[in-house]
Image (spheres, helix red, strand yellow):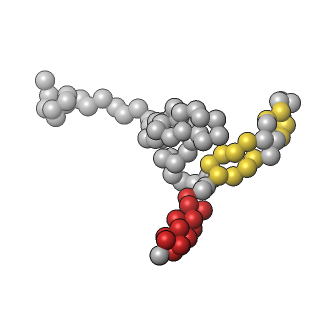
Amino acid sequence: MKKIIALIIVLFANAVVADEYVNGYIRSNGTYVEPHYRSSPDSSTYNNYSTQGNTNPYTGTQGTISPNYAAPQAPSAPNPYGYYGYRK
């Protein structure tokens, strides 16, 4: 029974790992970027190392970006009827 539980834990632990290795490269401005690990790209904003509440396991740094970040919205026109919906 213990072997089955251990096997299940190992199988699920592999599924949780979502890291990918990035080879070193040279940017267009000539700066060399060291090889590093990053979280695999996906559509979630909650599972990245840079998200608040997460810690990068390779560097130990805490995430600083809000998980609710989104594209900036266009400003809306002011409501001519005031906050409660009637003219003052």
Q: Residue furthest top?
A: 88
Instruction: Identify which residue, 24 or 61, lies in the foreground.
Output: 61
Residue 35 x/y as whole percent: 78, 41
Residue at (14, 28) in percent of width and height: 87
Measured along the vertical axis of the image, is residue 37 above or below residue 11?
A: above
Count of labels in the image: 0
Measured along the vertical axis of the image, is residue 1 above or below residue 39?
A: below
Residue at (58, 32) in percent of width and height: 61
Instruction: Identify which residue, 7 or 42, lies in the foreground.
Output: 7
Is residue 80 visible in this depiction of the protein?
yes
Residue 74 x/y as whole percent: 44, 35
Residue at (56, 61) in percent of width and height: 13
Instruction: Identify which residue, 32 or 68, lies in the foreground.
Output: 32
Residue 38 x/y as whole percent: 66, 45
Q: Quadrant of residue 78?
A: top left
- Image check: 28 left or right of 19? right
- Image check: 36 left or right of 13? right
Measured along the vertical axis of the image, is residue 68 above or below residue 14?
A: above
**Quadrant in which the C terminus appears:** top left
Is residue 69 visible in this depiction of the protein?
no
Residue 28 x/y as whole percent: 83, 35
